Amino acid sequence: LADMKEKPIDYIIIPVGGGGLSAGMATWMAIHSPRTQIIVVEPENADAMKRSMESGKIITLDHLDTFVDGAAVKTPGEKNFTTLRLLPNVSYMTVKPGALSHEMCQLHDYDKKVVEPAGALSVAALRELAKNKSLLGKNIICVVTGGNIGMERWPDIRRRSYEHLGQEKEFKIAVKNSPGELRKILEKFVDGNHIVLLRFDHLEGPDDVACTIRLRNIANPGKITETERAMTEAGIMW
């Protein structure tokens, strides 16, 4: 940052958990680059700092979504909150888990970077902010932190990414408990989609079986929406 004086920084996007990194960076920027806008980003449903700022006092979240474990903090740090509250040019936003998962996959697939959910917060925020055309041509820095993630989490992250893009969805349907009934449903409603999960959950009385079907369609996500509409109209959704 100190070497970028020739090209002023318009925005810097910083992930936040307890607030130490963001408070420290925002303080440094206020001294060395006071015109820079600071955007502090948290996971949705784990936004203790944002809610505290809106309340004007430190609050503790009753419920905490721990998907972004590196930034899942119920109560922001007291000194960090006080520091950020006094600094100018600081704003706050949140990112949905699905959007964050998609950004993690993008970073992995196209930039060959393995980052944990907290590490991708700033880039996911930038994608959302980029919808505002006024940011075109601006000099924006994203702070990407942390690669502490096990490979066992990646299937869930991929699933969340597909769901965010509308490319995958899980359905619970009622199937008559007799031979050939499930096949009829699959042929009528699922054609054109890929079945990635099929599970019989439980019997609902002597006549019906509850089934879970997870469908994916990367090439034509609209087909998933069509399937959902058709199942709903047929009255087989559980």
Image: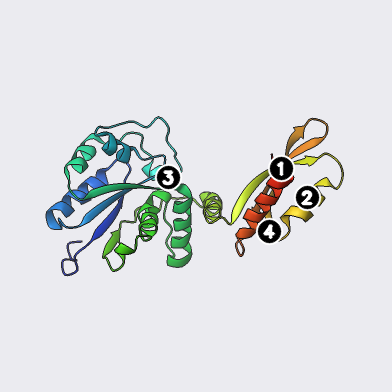
Q: CA distance from mark 1 to mark 2?
A: 10 Å
Q: CA distance from mark 2 to mark 4?
A: 13 Å
Front residue (pair 16, 69): 16
Residue drawn at the location 83% of the way across and 46% of the way down: 181
Q: Which residue is mark 4?
A: 193
Dot 1 crowding, Cα within 10 Å, few <14, some 14–19, many 20+: many
Q: Which residue is mark 2?
A: 185
Whole-percent x, y for residue 177 in the image: 83, 39
Precedes in sequence: disc 2 or disc 3: 3
Q: Secondary structure at mark 1?
A: strand
Hey, which residue is sitting farthest left in the picture?
31
Q: Quadrant of the C terminus?
A: top right
Q: Secondary structure at mark 4?
A: loop
Q: Which mark is residue 68?
A: 3
Q: Secondary structure at mark 3?
A: loop
- Which residue type does callout 2 highlight? Ile
Precedes in sequence: disc 1 or disc 2: 1
Whole-percent x, y for residue 124 in the image: 40, 55
Q: CA distance from mark 2 to mark 3?
A: 37 Å
CB under 8 Å between callouts 1 and 2?
yes
Q: Which residue is mark 1?
A: 173
Judged left or right of residue 192, residue 140 is: left
Dot 2 crowding, Cα within 10 Å, few <14, some 14–19, many 20+: some
- Which residue type does callout 3 highlight? Val
- Which residue type does callout 4 highlight? Asn
Q: CA distance from mark 1 to mark 3?
A: 31 Å
